[in-house]
Image: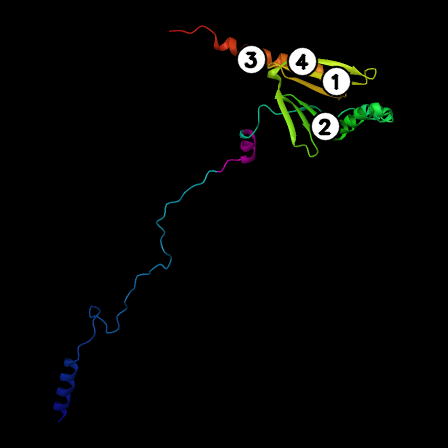
Amino acid sequence: MAMATTTACSSSATSTPLLSPTTPSLHTITRIPFISTTPKCNRPITKLHVSSNPVASSSTSTSKPNQESIFFDGGAHYGDLAANLVLGFTLLWLPLTLASVFRAFYLRYRFTNLRVTVISGLTGQDRSDFSYKVIKDVQVVPRFIGEWGDVIITLKDGTVVDLRSVPKFREIAKYCLSMVDKESSGVSKETNATDGPKGF
């Protein structure tokens, strides 16, 4: 009986194999690769180049080389209205008094470096402009001991523009003549440049 028990124990011992280091375990560890949750963007990167001073570039591009400047802008001399109102008590002078009132309230002269403008009418709707290029001659007629006067402008087509009761009429006439000379000299230079010798 003792031998039978020993044999049974030895057979059970031999039937159960021992785990060796090379034998795979029942609980194996599986390594899962790490998956990044951040999506990859394949869009190209565009670089924007912004100028340092955009305001300066826009101002230089919109600058006007021939800017108009005003030399005189005003109506008839107030002395013309006052003198005609005093003389208006006589019936013979009444039409001239009414004309002076119209000039004082509804007539305006403007002299710039580019043109001469005459504005008239109740709302200023009547306006005539002409440049210094079309002026042929400028004359003055003093009124009331030279306090004011008339400026008579003759155009090249024969039209006569009579500006009455103009203040500072002598200075305005000199300015008009100087601008006429300036325009004529500029035109002569352009014609000389275009009429130069031409090569074959």
- Which residue reaches farthest bottom? 1
Residue identifier under label 1: 150
Residue at 75% from the left image edge and 29% from the top image edge: 102
Badge 3: how crowded within 10 Å, few (<14), some, or many (20+)? few
Q: Earlier in the sequence, mark 4 or mark 3?
A: 4
Residue identifier under label 3: 187
Kind of residue sitting beneath label 2: Leu
Q: Secondary structure at mark 1?
A: strand
Distance from disc 2 to disc 1, alpha carbons, whole Å, reads 14 Å
Residue identifier under label 2: 107
Badge 4: how crowded within 10 Å, few (<14), some, or many (20+)? some
On the picture, is 135 further left or further right than 143? left
Residue identifier under label 4: 177
Of the residues tagged 1 and 3, which is closer to the observer?
Answer: 1
On the picture, is 195 further left or further right than 172? left
Q: Earlier in the sequence, mark 1 or mark 3?
A: 1
Of the residues tagged 1 and 4, which is closer to the observer?
Answer: 1
**54 in the magenta segment:** yes
Kind of residue sitting beneath label 3: Val
In the rendered image, residue 111, in percent from the top left (x then y), is placed at 68, 22
